[in-house]
Image (cartoon, rainbow, N blue to C red):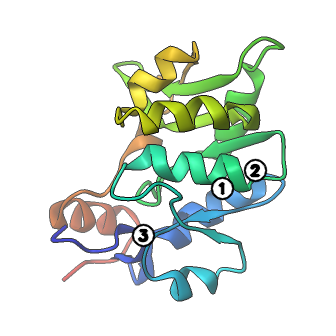
Amino acid sequence: MAGSDKGLIELAGRPLIDYVIAAFKPQVQSLMISANRNLEQYGRYGAPVVADTVAGFAGPLSGMLSALQAADTPLVATVPCDAPLLAADYVARLAAALGPDTRACVAHDGQRLQPVFTLLRRDLADSLQAFVHGHDWQVRRWLETVNAVAVDFSDSPDQFTNVNTPADVSRLALQFGAPHD
Protein backbone atom coordinates (compact mmCIF):
# COMPACT_ATOMS: atom_id res chain seq x y z
CA MET A 1 0.00 0.00 0.00
CA ALA A 2 2.94 2.26 -0.82
CA GLY A 3 3.98 2.73 2.81
CA SER A 4 0.58 3.95 3.93
CA ASP A 5 -0.47 3.45 7.52
CA LYS A 6 -2.98 0.67 6.86
CA GLY A 7 -5.13 1.41 9.89
CA LEU A 8 -5.84 4.88 8.52
CA ILE A 9 -6.63 3.82 4.95
CA GLU A 10 -10.24 4.68 4.22
CA LEU A 11 -12.81 2.06 3.38
CA ALA A 12 -16.27 3.36 2.49
CA GLY A 13 -15.41 6.73 4.06
CA ARG A 14 -14.00 5.40 7.35
CA PRO A 15 -10.48 4.40 8.37
CA LEU A 16 -9.96 0.64 8.59
CA ILE A 17 -9.27 0.90 12.31
CA ASP A 18 -12.84 2.18 12.83
CA TYR A 19 -14.20 -1.15 11.64
CA VAL A 20 -11.79 -3.18 13.74
CA ILE A 21 -12.49 -1.19 16.90
CA ALA A 22 -16.26 -1.38 16.35
CA ALA A 23 -16.05 -5.18 16.15
CA PHE A 24 -13.31 -5.74 18.74
CA LYS A 25 -14.14 -3.31 21.57
CA PRO A 26 -17.38 -5.03 22.69
CA GLN A 27 -15.44 -8.30 23.00
CA VAL A 28 -12.70 -7.15 25.38
CA GLN A 29 -12.39 -5.64 28.83
CA SER A 30 -10.11 -2.86 27.63
CA LEU A 31 -8.64 -1.77 24.33
CA MET A 32 -5.08 -0.86 23.40
CA ILE A 33 -3.74 0.26 20.03
CA SER A 34 -0.26 -0.72 18.87
CA ALA A 35 1.16 1.93 16.54
CA ASN A 36 4.51 3.42 15.66
CA ARG A 37 3.40 6.44 13.66
CA ASN A 38 0.40 8.74 13.54
CA LEU A 39 0.16 8.35 17.30
CA GLU A 40 -1.96 11.47 17.68
CA GLN A 41 -4.54 10.20 15.20
CA TYR A 42 -4.73 6.82 16.92
CA GLY A 43 -4.90 8.56 20.30
CA ARG A 44 -8.24 10.08 19.27
CA TYR A 45 -9.84 6.67 19.70
CA GLY A 46 -9.62 7.03 23.48
CA ALA A 47 -7.49 3.93 24.02
CA PRO A 48 -3.86 3.84 25.10
CA VAL A 49 -1.50 3.82 22.12
CA VAL A 50 1.55 1.63 22.65
CA ALA A 51 4.62 1.92 20.45
CA ASP A 52 7.07 -0.91 19.81
CA THR A 53 9.69 -1.37 22.51
CA VAL A 54 12.05 -3.20 20.14
CA ALA A 55 14.37 -1.02 18.06
CA GLY A 56 14.11 -1.37 14.30
CA PHE A 57 11.29 -3.16 12.58
CA ALA A 58 10.46 -6.48 14.20
CA GLY A 59 7.02 -6.66 12.61
CA PRO A 60 3.88 -7.81 14.39
CA LEU A 61 5.80 -9.61 17.13
CA SER A 62 7.15 -6.31 18.37
CA GLY A 63 3.64 -4.90 18.66
CA MET A 64 2.49 -8.05 20.43
CA LEU A 65 5.40 -7.76 22.86
CA SER A 66 4.65 -4.11 23.60
CA ALA A 67 1.00 -4.98 24.22
CA LEU A 68 1.89 -7.84 26.57
CA GLN A 69 4.27 -5.56 28.48
CA ALA A 70 1.71 -2.75 28.78
CA ALA A 71 -1.38 -4.86 29.50
CA ASP A 72 -3.03 -4.80 32.90
CA THR A 73 -5.22 -7.81 32.12
CA PRO A 74 -4.11 -11.47 32.32
CA LEU A 75 -5.02 -12.06 28.66
CA VAL A 76 -4.30 -10.05 25.52
CA ALA A 77 -6.25 -10.60 22.30
CA THR A 78 -4.67 -9.38 19.08
CA VAL A 79 -6.07 -8.52 15.69
CA PRO A 80 -4.50 -6.53 12.84
CA CYS A 81 -5.84 -3.09 11.98
CA ASP A 82 -6.50 -4.07 8.37
CA ALA A 83 -9.10 -6.79 9.05
CA PRO A 84 -12.46 -4.99 8.90
CA LEU A 85 -14.65 -8.14 8.90
CA LEU A 86 -13.86 -9.39 12.41
CA ALA A 87 -16.60 -11.64 13.81
CA ALA A 88 -18.53 -10.63 16.92
CA ASP A 89 -17.55 -13.90 18.65
CA TYR A 90 -13.85 -13.84 17.76
CA VAL A 91 -12.48 -13.38 21.30
CA ALA A 92 -15.06 -15.69 22.91
CA ARG A 93 -14.11 -18.52 20.56
CA LEU A 94 -10.42 -18.11 21.27
CA ALA A 95 -11.09 -17.91 25.03
CA ALA A 96 -13.19 -21.10 24.91
CA ALA A 97 -10.10 -22.97 23.70
CA LEU A 98 -7.89 -21.58 26.45
CA GLY A 99 -7.34 -24.37 28.97
CA PRO A 100 -5.50 -24.04 32.28
CA ASP A 101 -2.21 -25.11 30.68
CA THR A 102 -2.73 -23.24 27.41
CA ARG A 103 -0.74 -20.04 27.15
CA ALA A 104 -1.74 -18.99 23.63
CA CYS A 105 -4.49 -19.61 21.10
CA VAL A 106 -4.28 -18.76 17.41
CA ALA A 107 -7.03 -18.67 14.81
CA HIS A 108 -7.05 -21.19 11.98
CA ASP A 109 -9.26 -20.42 8.97
CA GLY A 110 -9.58 -24.02 7.80
CA GLN A 111 -6.65 -23.67 5.39
CA ARG A 112 -3.90 -22.03 7.45
CA LEU A 113 -3.05 -20.40 10.74
CA GLN A 114 -3.78 -16.71 11.02
CA PRO A 115 -0.83 -15.90 13.31
CA VAL A 116 -1.69 -12.32 14.23
CA PHE A 117 -5.18 -13.31 15.35
CA THR A 118 -4.34 -14.55 18.83
CA LEU A 119 -5.26 -14.71 22.48
CA LEU A 120 -2.15 -14.65 24.67
CA ARG A 121 -1.50 -14.92 28.37
CA ARG A 122 0.30 -11.79 29.52
CA ASP A 123 2.99 -13.90 31.19
CA LEU A 124 4.30 -14.75 27.72
CA ALA A 125 6.05 -11.37 27.56
CA ASP A 126 9.42 -12.75 28.71
CA SER A 127 9.28 -15.62 26.22
CA LEU A 128 8.39 -13.27 23.40
CA GLN A 129 11.05 -10.75 24.37
CA ALA A 130 13.75 -13.45 24.30
CA PHE A 131 12.48 -14.69 20.95
CA VAL A 132 12.45 -11.24 19.34
CA HIS A 133 15.85 -10.34 20.75
CA GLY A 134 17.12 -13.54 19.16
CA HIS A 135 16.23 -11.78 15.88
CA ASP A 136 13.61 -14.27 14.83
CA TRP A 137 10.53 -12.27 14.01
CA GLN A 138 8.24 -14.89 12.54
CA VAL A 139 5.00 -14.96 14.50
CA ARG A 140 4.21 -18.54 13.50
CA ARG A 141 7.56 -19.79 14.80
CA TRP A 142 7.14 -18.07 18.16
CA LEU A 143 3.62 -19.48 18.51
CA GLU A 144 5.09 -22.95 17.94
CA THR A 145 7.59 -22.42 20.77
CA VAL A 146 4.76 -21.71 23.23
CA ASN A 147 2.59 -24.56 21.94
CA ALA A 148 -0.23 -22.29 20.83
CA VAL A 149 -3.53 -24.08 20.34
CA ALA A 150 -5.10 -23.63 16.90
CA VAL A 151 -8.76 -22.62 17.07
CA ASP A 152 -10.99 -23.63 14.18
CA PHE A 153 -12.66 -20.70 12.45
CA SER A 154 -13.27 -22.56 9.19
CA ASP A 155 -16.95 -21.61 9.42
CA SER A 156 -16.09 -17.88 9.25
CA PRO A 157 -12.86 -17.44 7.25
CA ASP A 158 -13.97 -14.07 5.82
CA GLN A 159 -13.10 -12.36 9.09
CA PHE A 160 -9.43 -12.88 8.24
CA THR A 161 -9.74 -10.87 5.03
CA ASN A 162 -7.22 -8.08 5.23
CA VAL A 163 -6.45 -5.09 3.10
CA ASN A 164 -3.14 -5.34 1.28
CA THR A 165 -3.79 -3.63 -2.06
CA PRO A 166 -5.93 -0.85 -3.53
CA ALA A 167 -7.94 -3.62 -5.24
CA ASP A 168 -8.76 -5.04 -1.79
CA VAL A 169 -10.05 -1.63 -0.73
CA SER A 170 -12.24 -1.39 -3.83
CA ARG A 171 -13.62 -4.90 -3.40
CA LEU A 172 -14.42 -4.41 0.28
CA ALA A 173 -15.90 -0.96 -0.34
CA LEU A 174 -18.52 -2.61 -2.52
CA GLN A 175 -19.21 -5.09 0.28
CA PHE A 176 -19.74 -2.17 2.68
CA GLY A 177 -22.07 -0.53 0.19
CA ALA A 178 -19.87 2.32 -0.94
CA PRO A 179 -17.97 2.63 -4.20
CA HIS A 180 -14.27 3.45 -3.89
CA ASP A 181 -12.45 5.85 -6.20
Residue type at mark 3 is: Gly
Quadrant including the C terminus: bottom left
Q: Report the front residue among 160 and 114.
A: 114
- Residue 175: name its quadrant: bottom left
Q: Report the front residue among 59 and 85.
A: 59
Dot 2 and dot 3 residues touching (CB under 8 Å): no
Can residue 86 be seen here? The reply is no
Dot 2 and dot 1 residues touching (CB under 8 Å): yes
User: Which residue has dot 1 on it?
Assistant: 24
Q: Report the front residue among 115 and 18.
A: 115
Q: Which mark is residue 7?
A: 3
- Residue 126: name its quadrant: top right
Q: Report the front residue among 10 and 60.
A: 60
Earlier in the chain: of badge 3 and badge 1, it is 3
User: SS class of the residue under badge 2?
Assistant: helix
Mark 3 nearby-residue class (10 Å; few <14, some 14–19, many ≥20): many
Q: Which of marks 3 and 1 is in front?
A: 3
Mark 2 nearby-residue class (10 Å; few <14, some 14–19, many ≥20): some
Report the residue at 74% width, 38% height from top.
122
Total marks shown come to 3
Cα distance in 3D space between marks 3 and 1: 14 Å
Earlier in the chain: of badge 2 and badge 3, it is 3
Residue 180 x, y percent position in the rendering: 24, 78
Q: Residue 27 carries which label?
A: 2
Cα distance in 3D space between marks 2 and 3: 19 Å
